[in-house]
Amino acid sequence: MRWRKLDDIWSCALHGRILSIRQDTTNLYYQTSFPERPFERLTPPPSAPRSRADSLPENVDTEALVHHYFNLGPNLTELYEQWSSVDANFKKKAPKFAGVRILKQDAWEALIEKLCSHYGPLLGYVGATPYHDMPSPMMLADPKVESQLRQLGFGYRAKYLHQTAVQICQKDNEKWLDNLRNPESPVMGQKVGTAGEMQPGGRAGYRAAHGELLALQGVGPKVADCVCLMGLGWGEAVPVDTHVWQIAQRDYKFGKGKHSSLTKATYDAVGDWFRSLWGKEAGWAHSVLFTADLRAFSERLSTKVEVKTVKMEGEDLAIDAILTSALVAGTKTEVVETKVKRESEADHQDGSAIPKTNTRAKRRKHL
């Protein structure tokens, strides 16, 4: 698991640093710590795809990384209103699941995120827990890796993970993964481009990226869509698993006639239906309903929730960050637009999760 929780603080190794965050009803707090010595590589320096972006220097603003990684730019209030206007089922469930966002992961991270703690370079500790950065494709392409992964309990996936790394290393263009990315959602620091017109099956770039990923060992339609959605920025990607198939049957009348079982044709039909309903961010909207369908959150659907929107003030707003209160059954959920303000990061580099830099929310008025 990439993110680990200690008390009310979540920590993750990300882009050469340990990022620790916590949240209250109006603020998102974060702290970073960097390794005190250069990374100890298991192999010679790799030629990793740039999607990984693992060589960000320490002076890169962590606040900008937080904005990018958690995809804080889009206005969730507007998106939820848009999806609710075309879908009564979404309108009914969404207010109780405010704050769901799609991460902007690196494509390589989205492919192999579970391997971080076994092969990535050690960055440091939070308490007694070690945190490792993402291993490169070259690290996992080592012939010994497959047997080591089997010993670690990866089973049949060991072969697929190793061969996928080998395939990526063998690509002629080291920017292969980047070339599959949605130009409207570029790697951090790159210019935003255009991705073309939306089609029933998604934009041409999405369909091409999905097809390329299917050529990797062990990557099926669902995994390819997960990578497209969270690693390559293709918002129309709709990963269809058991939960989503159940949602399609129960709430959208799938499961009859030629779509009585989850075949490849049905998988495509479910994705196309949601794309026609929600547009180019269909994968985001589907993730809200996916969350609502999980047993761990089911009790929220029977809890009355009041949604408030708070407008902020400030002359140098960088993003429309929308943060939510902890969604505890029986409490009120508040969608808050906040101003992000950087404070000094003191000398706290020992890995302890004490927030030194935070975001501030200035309340102005209720709409």
Image (tube, rainbow, N blue to C red):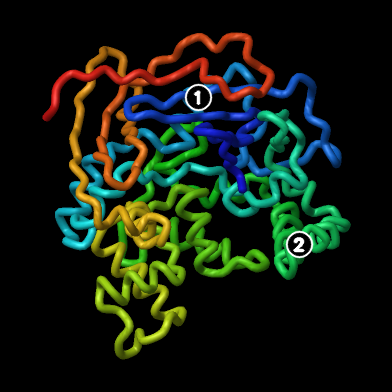
Residue 335, picture quadrant? top left
Figure check: 356 above or below 117:
above
Q: Amino acid at mark 2?
A: Gly
Figure check: 316 above or below 115:
above
The residue shown at (30%, 79%) is 254
The residue shown at (55%, 22%) is 31
Name the spot of residue 334 as percent of width and height, x first: 25, 35
Q: Nearer the viewer, residue 256 or 167?
A: 256
Name the spot of residue 18 as percent of width and height, x first: 63, 29
Residue that extends furthest to the bottom in the rendered view of this protein: 257
Residue 349, picture quadrant? top right
SS at mark 1 in the image? strand
For the residue carrying disc 1, how many other residues have a C-alpha within 10 Å: few (<14), some (14-19), or many (20+)? many
Is residue 282 visible to us here?
no
The residue shown at (34%, 54%) is 288
In the picture, the quarter occupied by the C terminus is top left
Q: Name the mark on residue 153.
A: 2
Figure check: 241 above or below 39:
below
Residue marked by disc 1: 30
